[in-house]
Amino acid sequence: MPVLENFEITGLAAEGNALGRHGDMVVFVPFGAPGDIADVKLEKKKKSYAQGRIVALKQPSRDRVQPPCEHFTICGGCRWQHLPYRMQLEAKHRQVADAIDRIAKVEHPAIPKTLGSRNIWCYRNKMEYTFSNRCWLTFEQLESGEEFPDRDAAGFHIPGAFDKVLDIKKCHLQDDLGNRIRLFVKAYGKEHGLTFYDLKAQSGFLRTLMIRIASTGECMALMAFGEDRPADIEALMQALADEFPSLTSIMYAVNTKVNDTLGDIDIKLFKGKEYIEEEMEGLRFRVGPKSFYQTNSEQAYELYKVVRDFARLKGGELVYDLYTGTGTIANFVSRLARKVVGIEYVPEAIADAKINSAVNGIENTVFFAGDMKDVLTDSFIAEHGRPDVMIIDPPRAGMHQDVVDTVLRAEPDAIVYVSCNPATQARDLALLDVKYSVEAVQPVDMFPHTQHVENVVRLVRRQQAQMADSTEL
């Protein structure tokens, strides 16, 4: 493939890439910055576009900043550490606006600036690391001619290579306690001759490590072992407890499955509590090893305040919270509603939601577990009441068509749609457009230095919107 010399990067595109034009062809380039002049080697070429990578940065953009992470461009977790934060927020705003304009194609008011995160480093409350006996070697290491007999690693999967793990020295996205825990477990494993997991052979003792650090300061460490060796497990867990006596919860699991997921694995408590707690406006939320909780605790509060504001509750409304997870939004808005009905696919999450209501003395919430399209039916709505407001926070894939149809038949006065994927949200906005108009939009940045953005949209039933307009006249 050819090298495009002195190629100018002119903008940012989807998936965190930068872009420029070579004649009529758009070229997508990772880790570029608008204003860069670089030699770009093409690696994939189609009729109207190509993908390439920078092989020589001839003239850096004036907007470039120095990334603090030594693993930047390799680990794949952050795509935009080289961009100033204001530019990241502007790019996320464009991503939301483009999705609504080009995919939804619906009328909407002006979209305000992306709500930025106060902390852009050490903001994640959850990190998951993988142990491997075959660490990823960088191009520089391979070209050095050196041999690397010690390939044990504790870090992140390389994008597109399930069996390759980059050994992480320091991650800047979580409090440094997370780094210290990971490095301690790795050093302990090396010192005591414990085997690191072989992802191809599906064998080895040290497999994965999850670390949760709540905004309250509470911390959970969960080790997953690939082999059931009680004496070695006991020794490592005790060493971890001795080294970090402030840990709130120390847990472990034995996972001999092919995949790393622990949803169907028995989690055992070694020391401390079975959960840690997050706090929001005096409400306490219990977070267990399998619980979902927004990974940026501080910014989750800002997101939920937007949701509450968009719901515009007066106190007498029946609210449906679809895809409620552990009931965080449901419980957060319950003070302003007559009743909140939460629905979620994962039974363990619903159990957490009920507990979170109980520990906070909230008595006007009810929760149901099951596939959304099977639970949210016309008969369910007839039994529990037509909602005045629906809060919808689906997974990245958006809503199933059956769910959209049921929402349209239910005809809530207002819908607050929260999404981590502006493209599928925009698709659903187009489907809802037959009865609902977009009244407000607010992008929220939950993940600085990545291309991901949350977006909140308030929709109102057209009859309601027309009545409001006539009242104002």
Image (spheres, rainbow, N blue to C red):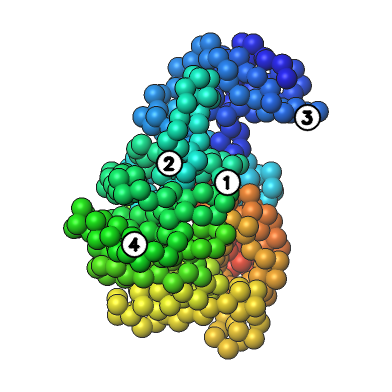
The image quarter containing residue 246 is bottom left
User: Which residue is the extreme one toward the right?
Assistant: 47
- Answer few, some or many: residues within 10 Å of disc 3's Cα (few below 14, many 20 plus, some between 14 and 19): few
Q: Quadrant of the C terminus?
A: bottom right
User: Could you say which is closer to the camera, residue 209 or residue 364?
Assistant: 209
Q: Position of residue 344 (x, y in %)?
A: 53, 72
Residue assigned mark 4? 233
Q: Earlier in the sequence, mark 3 or mark 4?
A: 3
**Distance between mark 3 and mark 1 Cα atoms:** 26 Å
Q: Does residue 333 appear anywhere in the picture? A: no
Q: Residue at x 50, y 36 (%)?
A: 136
Q: Amino acid at mark 2?
A: Asp
**Distance between mark 2 and mark 3 Cα atoms:** 39 Å
Residue assigned mark 3? 46
Q: Amino acid at mark 4?
A: Ile
Q: Residue at x 58, y 20 (%)?
A: 54
Residue assigned mark 1? 162
Residue assigned mark 2? 152
